[in-house]
Image: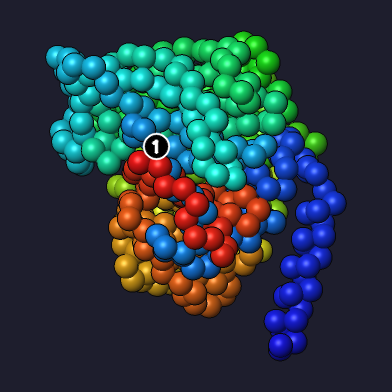
Amino acid sequence: MSALEDGYTRRMVRSRLLVSILVWVIVGGIAVQADSWPRWRGPLATGEAPEGNPPVTWSEERNVAWKVSVPGKGLSSPIVHGGRVFVTTAVAFGNPLESPEHEHEHDDGAHDNVVPDRRMRFDVLAYDVDDGSLVWSTTVRTEQPHEAAHVTGSWASPSAITDGKRLYASFGSRGLYALDLDGKVLWERDLGDMRVRHAHGEGSSPALRGDTLVVNWDHQGDSFLVALDTATGKTKWKTERDEITSWSSPLIVPVGDRVQVVVAATDRVRGYDMEDGSPIWECEGLSRNVVATPVATDGLVIVANSYDGKKMMAIRLAGARGDITGTEHVVWERDRDTPYVPSPVLHEGRLYFLKHSHGFLTAVEAATGKTLFGPVRLGPVRNVFASPVVAAGRIYIPSRDGATLVAEAGTVFKTLAVNELDDSFSASPAVAGDALFLRGDRHLYKIAADQAPVSSAP
């Protein structure tokens, strides 16, 4: 064993000892267990599982602990907590109904949408982490969606989130629900019907800190940001927003002795006071159709999109007030190879991101924007909607092509493995302990080392 390998082994042993001692930690105001993935983009809201160590290689015949069929369709990411994996889904049923009429622009791919022709059941599902058995299924609403979704999308795209006491599941226009961890609905809120640009569907996931749940509601109508009490669902504050449709999720970031909610959108990226929703700063620079969720590190928040134009910006939050466009608070920016659908992932001061929604990976220094490598072609990983995750110094990038590339998370690109499964992956993965959870179009997989399939439900 080399000195480098020996040092890595000792670090992993120390990490394992730490995990065995700590029952839970507080990250961003959320109490999480070391083997949990409690929200969209994971415990650090960066896409990293700091204590995770899933396998490097797998196939349908190897390192699949279980594989279960998930009813309906959903692009929401799985979350993991308390020995359960939670997903949301929308299930069409009954006789086809007359499709509602829709009026929307016919440009930029507006024809790529599908209109529901029947009623749908909106479900929250809980699976057992160990064997994949269905623990409970709760239908929170049944109705026909008022608007279409993109042909590659779903009516269950926002990801759930948990504080360890309750599970919060958003179906956008179909309602926001708080459930206990046994599937009982505790409260619900109907925030209205979104009128989404191109009728391409809804996707922003809620954010959570302490006893406050934050929801962004950008659409082709009256847009707003709203904070809700986690115990009751009652409104704490609501701030109107002059924005069109975006799909990006809000990011909650401590700044000094205060906390901000950062929202990336078309007209402006804005920071709001978490306490009362008052605007603090704003910055121009992104184009339409903002999808990628921001990440934060060392006092910077990094936002990006790639639609009408390509842009990535790193914004220094300390002292930012008013309109900071073109000021020293914009620490760096780039106008090439930026992500559209997949969000960036952050690890040890390095930012990794896909080019648009294609299989090209770039790495930069988060503090300076200096390119470390890329864009590097990812071989059979070509069409990427899922956001990459990092665990044990490795990047995991699933694709709609059915392949997941595993690469070294370093300053030089190095492929470690390319793993093929019999599904297509648009939902972002979750990492909990030594397992990787992949939600495909048809199945939910648990990938764990030295495992032959233990269950494969139809």
Q: Position of residue 223 (x, y in %)?
A: 43, 21
- Res 266 quadrant in image: top left
The residue lying at 63 percent from left, 57 percent from top is 434
The spot of residue 219 in percent (x, y) is 37, 25
Q: Residue furthest bottom?
A: 2
Tell me where residue 48 sits by quadrant.
bottom right
In the image: residue 308, left or right of residue 257: left
Residue at (68%, 48%) from the top-left corner?
A: 35
Circle 1 SS class: loop
Report crowding for label 1: few under 14, some 14 to 19, many 20 or more residues within 10 A (C-alpha).
many
Please state which of residues 9 and 112 is positioned toward the viewer in this rendering: 9
Say above or below: 419 vs 219: below
Residue 261 in the image: x percent, y percent? 61, 33
Q: Residue at x 19, y 21 (%)?
A: 117
Q: Point out the image quarter for the N terminus.
A: bottom right
Name the residue rendered at 42%, 63% in the picture.
61
Residue 142 against residue 435 in the figure, above or below = above
Type of colouring: rainbow
Q: Is residue 106 above or below residue 101?
A: below
Name the spot of residue 445 as percent of width and height, x first. 46, 49
- Identity of the residue furthest to the right in this view: 21
Q: Which residue is mark 1?
A: 70
Q: Is residue 457 left or right of residue 262?
A: left
Viewer-nearest residue: 440 or 332? 440
Residue 154: tell me if it is visible.
yes
Kind of residue at disc 1: Val
Image quadrant holding the C terminus, namely top left
